[in-house]
Image (cartoon, helix red, strand yellow):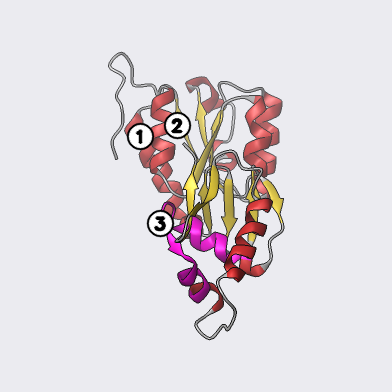
Amino acid sequence: MNFKQNNSSNSINISDWKNIIYDFKPKISIIDSDYSIEETLKSQFVKLVILDTTKITSSSINYCKKECSLVKKPILALITKEMTSTIHLEKEYADFIITPVNNLELSARIQKILYKDNSLLKETNIQIGDISINLETYEVFVKNERITLRFKEFQLLQLLISNPEKVYTRESLLNQIWGYNYFGGTRTVDVHIRRLRSKISNSNSSSIETIWNVGYRFRKNR
């Protein structure tokens, strides 16, 4: 894993944060403002929370700890040296780092938490842009809002989103989703794709694209 080093300091800048989060799976989210708490906590796809206690209020810190405990999201806390004598770090957080933070130490701490609990590493979610699928609960979210799909619609979306940019012919989709023994025609695929599109139309980042005379593909909008 490569990190952009800041020559003037060991602390992490914005680009470093993004690199670290992007490279890690499952999804990691940073809470570094009071406004980012609710969005992070309501997302079931976030598996690990990095809580910057130096940038949010004490009441928000307590609220975040309580809510993360309820939904079993471990917290990696960024704290000041002065805080080490005032809180019970080993009881309140999965781990902590004293600021300023070194890139390699942050990476190591994240890996330690994730590998300590193997359930955090289990791939149960697929997310591209603002569309997310939970493979265990068969739930689909667009912009963190749950939408209702029929089973065949879910299967179509799962197949397409699992292989973005790959073009599937109508015949291939029909065989993979409905089976080779299905006696209906490819018109069935078109009907289900149309319904699926209408249900995920709220997405700003992704879409199902028609490849004329061929089939469909899932494309992340540029």
Q: Where is 28 relative to 196, above or below?
A: above
**Quadrant housing residue 105:** top left
Instruction: Locate the N terminus by quadrant.
Output: top left
Q: Amino acid at mark 2?
A: Ile
Location of residue 46 in the rendering, given as x and y in whole percent from the top left corner: 56, 46
Secondary structure at badge 1 equals: helix
Circle 3: element type = loop
Contact flag, marks 2 and 3 (Cβ < 8 Å): no
- Mark sitting earlier along the chain (1/3): 1
Tags 2 and 1 in contact by the CB under 8 Å rule? Answer: yes
Q: Is residue 137 visible?
A: no
Magenta stretch mostly in which secondary structure? helix
Q: Does 6 appear above or below 29?
A: above
Q: On the image, numbered disc 3 is attached to which residue?
A: 166
In this view, 121 is above or below 14: below
Q: How many marks?
A: 3
- Eyeballing the image, is 198 above or below 110? below
* Contact check, label 1 and label 3, Cβ < 8 Å: no
The residue lying toward the viewer, choosing from 77 and 85, is 77
Give the residue number, with chain letter if any, for mark 2. Answer: 97
Sequence order check: which comes first, mark 2 or mark 3?
A: 2
Amino acid carrying mark 1 in the image: Glu
- Categorize mark 3 by other alpha carbons within 10 Å: few (<14), some (14-19), many (20+): few
Dot 3 amino acid type? Lys
Q: Which residues are magenta?
A: 153-175
Residue occupying image coordinates x 69% and y 41%: 66
Residue placed most toward the observer, 66 or 44: 44
